[in-house]
Image (cartoon, rainbow, N blue to C red):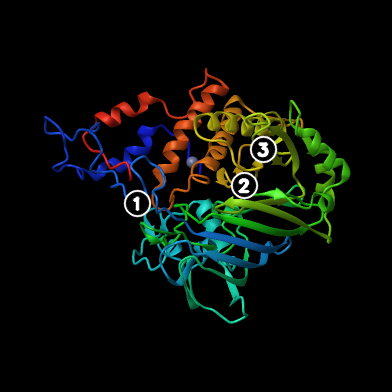
């Protein structure tokens, strides 16, 4: 996720007030201060049979595997998703499991969620506030409250059954759901179960979320960015068992890896971008579009699969007919997608490591509001990120890497990222962008595609340890930015941390 662009000093100062937690026998200092550059032996985990001292999996390392088969329908008018899914859970742990925990992230929007009940207005509690003095609200806060009270939000989940059709007992606790298995799941065994679910999609601009819809008054259409949208298995690990911390909206997540088979039914004139490889191009794309995709594989510049003219034509009409887009993704920890009739779509192949590594398609999906900014830079920035990150870390393991424009400022999921910057409409009807907006677009695409490496491939627990993925990714996005244009001060400058490192009051890197 991209937070506001600020210097490191500004990020750290407010939390630096929480004082001398580190002053103890591990000061390793000749003076009265804690040595900020001391060796970290006391802070690092002890190597064991699961995690070796070399930073590699130990001889007894294991992780669970969870495969999903999902059919989902988008009701554009009601802005509602309805779906059913079958989940296959493989217990690779040495433990017998009597129950499974799932994440229901949409429940964060329920009016009685822990997140909503702890929401404050300018420091004052929203619910049960005994303070009789009126609290001043901003228009944005009012708009959010209005949307939250006008709409029924959060998951409805039904028909939770095992593969014999027997009902499974489920208990929902805030954004989590525990499913009790009818028979304990032994080590090395699988269990299959299914459920139906539905929810109303939030308006991103009103609520402020990592997904949602955006409505365009002038043409009457929406862009849908859909994420954290299906009940997903919480991770089960050797070091924490169930990673079942509730979702409060700002923390992100960790999940299990698995294979996905997802059929997405949307209005027939929508263009869909999703985690995974499109499996039924011949039934959702025209022959011309399929030819363009092939041409894009070896193109020097991105090739339009859906041109601006075609997107503008789609934008005018609307239809009651539907189409089903079928995507398959292997070995990913999550699945997100986007859908709109406003999307143009461009693509360019990235040949990593010559003929030995599989071709990756860098792709972008954006409305006319993205304009030249997106045409010129989005897909090129996607490919640039893979070139740099792969050189410094590991090859990109998936067939597509995508950048989608919509209401979300910057957010990543496997193979797909949501990025916000756009052009501005001028009085004469043209669309322009400033140098700052250009830099913002390139910077956010690099940052979010970088997150496909950390944490979407290196699966750290973002709900608990945000610094792991944000730290690695902020460092590497600075490297990639400088390679794009070394004259621009991208990301965090080393000198920005000097004052903090010299300061008295610091907090642990975990914080
Ligand atoms: Zn980030």
Q: Residue at x 67, y 58 (%)?
A: 261
| Disc 3: CA contacts within 10 A as few (<14), some (14-19) or many (>=20) | some
Secondary structure category for the residue under label 3: loop
Instruction: Name, please, the residue furthest toward the left.
Output: 31
Q: Residue at x 34, y 38 (%)?
A: 12
Q: Residue at x 27, y 42 (%)?
A: 507
Which is more N-terminal, label 2 or label 1? Answer: 1
* In the rendered image, the vertical position of residue 377 relative to residue 241, given as above or below: above
User: Residue 18: x, y in percent?
Assistant: 25, 45
User: Residue 397: x, y in percent?
Assistant: 59, 41
Eye-nearest disc, 1 or 2? 1
Q: Which residue is mark 3?
A: 358
User: Residue 505: x, y in percent?
Assistant: 23, 38
Instruction: Name, please, the residue furthest toward the right.
Output: 287
Q: CA distance from mark 1 to mark 2?
A: 45 Å
Q: Quadrant of residue 60?
A: bottom left
Eye-nearest disc, 3 or 1? 1
Q: Using the image, tell me which numbered label, if any, was put on residue 49.
A: 1
| Contact? badges 3 and 2 (CB < 8 Å) | no
* In the rendered image, the vertical position of residue 240 relative to residue 398, given as above or below: below
Secondary structure category for the residue under label 1: loop
Q: Using the image, tell me which numbered label, if any, was put on residue 407.
A: 2
Q: Quadrant of residue 417?
A: top right
Q: Nearer the viewer, residue 462 or 240?
A: 240
Question: Quadrant location of the C terminus?
Answer: top left
| Disc 2: CA contacts within 10 A as few (<14), some (14-19) or many (>=20) | many
Secondary structure category for the residue under label 2: loop
């Amino acid at each position: 996720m991209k937070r506001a662009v600020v210097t490191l000093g500004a990020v750290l100062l407010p939390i630096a007030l929480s004082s001398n937690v580190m002053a103890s026998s591990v000061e390793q200092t000749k003076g009265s201060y804690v040595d900020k550059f001391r060796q970290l032996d006391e802070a690092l985990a002890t190597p064991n049979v699961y995690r070796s001292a070399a930073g590699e999996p130990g001889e007894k390392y294991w992780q669970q595997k969870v495969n999903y088969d999902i059919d989902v329908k988008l009701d554009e008018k009601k802005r509602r998703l309805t779906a059913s899914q079958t989940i296959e859970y493989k217990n690779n742990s040495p433990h017998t499991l009597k129950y499974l925990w799932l994440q229901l992230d949409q429940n964060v929007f329920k009016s009685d969620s822990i997140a909503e009940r702890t929401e404050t207005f300018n420091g004052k509690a929203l619910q049960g506030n005994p303070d009789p003095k009126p609290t001043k609200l901003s228009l944005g806060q009012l708009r959010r409250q209005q949307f939250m009270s006008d709409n029924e939000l959060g998951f409805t989940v039904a028909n939770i059954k095992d593969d014999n059709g027997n009902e499974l007992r489920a208990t929902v606790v805030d954004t989590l759901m525990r499913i009790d298995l009818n028979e304990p799941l032994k080590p090395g065994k699988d269990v299959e179960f299914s459920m139906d679910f539905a929810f109303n999609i939030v308006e991103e601009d009103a609520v402020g979320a990592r997904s949602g819809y955006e409505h365009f008054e002038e043409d009457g259409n929406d862009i849908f960015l859909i994420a954290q949208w299906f009940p997903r298995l919480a991770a089960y690990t050797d070091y924490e068992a169930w990673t079942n911390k509730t979702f409060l909206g700002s923390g992100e997540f960790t999940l299990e890896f698995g294979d996905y088979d997802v059929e997405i039914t949307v209005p027939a004139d929508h263009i869909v971008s999703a985690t995974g490889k499109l499996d039924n191009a011949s039934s959702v794309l025209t022959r011309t579009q399929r030819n363009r995709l092939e041409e894009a594989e070896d193109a020097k510049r991105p090739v339009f699969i859906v041109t601006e003219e075609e997107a503008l034509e789609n934008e005018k009409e609307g239809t009651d007919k539907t189409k089903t887009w079928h995507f398959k993704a292997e070995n990913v920890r999550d699945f997100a997608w986007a859908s709109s009739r406003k999307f143009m779509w461009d693509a360019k192949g990235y040949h990593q490591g010559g003929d030995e590594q599989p071709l990756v398609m860098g792709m972008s999906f954006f409305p006319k509001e993205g304009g030249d900014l997106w045409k010129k830079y989005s897909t090129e920035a996607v490919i640039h990120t893979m070139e740099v990150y792969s050189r410094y870390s590991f090859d990109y393991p998936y067939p597509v890497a995508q950048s989608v424009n919509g209401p979300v400022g910057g957010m990543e999921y496997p193979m797909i990222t949501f990025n916000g910057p756009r052009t501005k409409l001028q009085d004469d009807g043209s669309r322009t962008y400033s140098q700052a907006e250009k830099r913002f677009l390139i910077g956010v695409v690099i940052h979010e595609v970088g997150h496909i490496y950390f944490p979407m491939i290196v699966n750290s627990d973002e709900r608990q340890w945000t610094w792991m993925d944000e730290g690695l990714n902020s460092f590497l996005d600075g490297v990639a930015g400088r390679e794009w244009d070394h004259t621009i001060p991208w990301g965090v400058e080393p000198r920005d941390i000097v004052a903090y490192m010299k300061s008295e009051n610091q907090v642990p890197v975990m914080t």
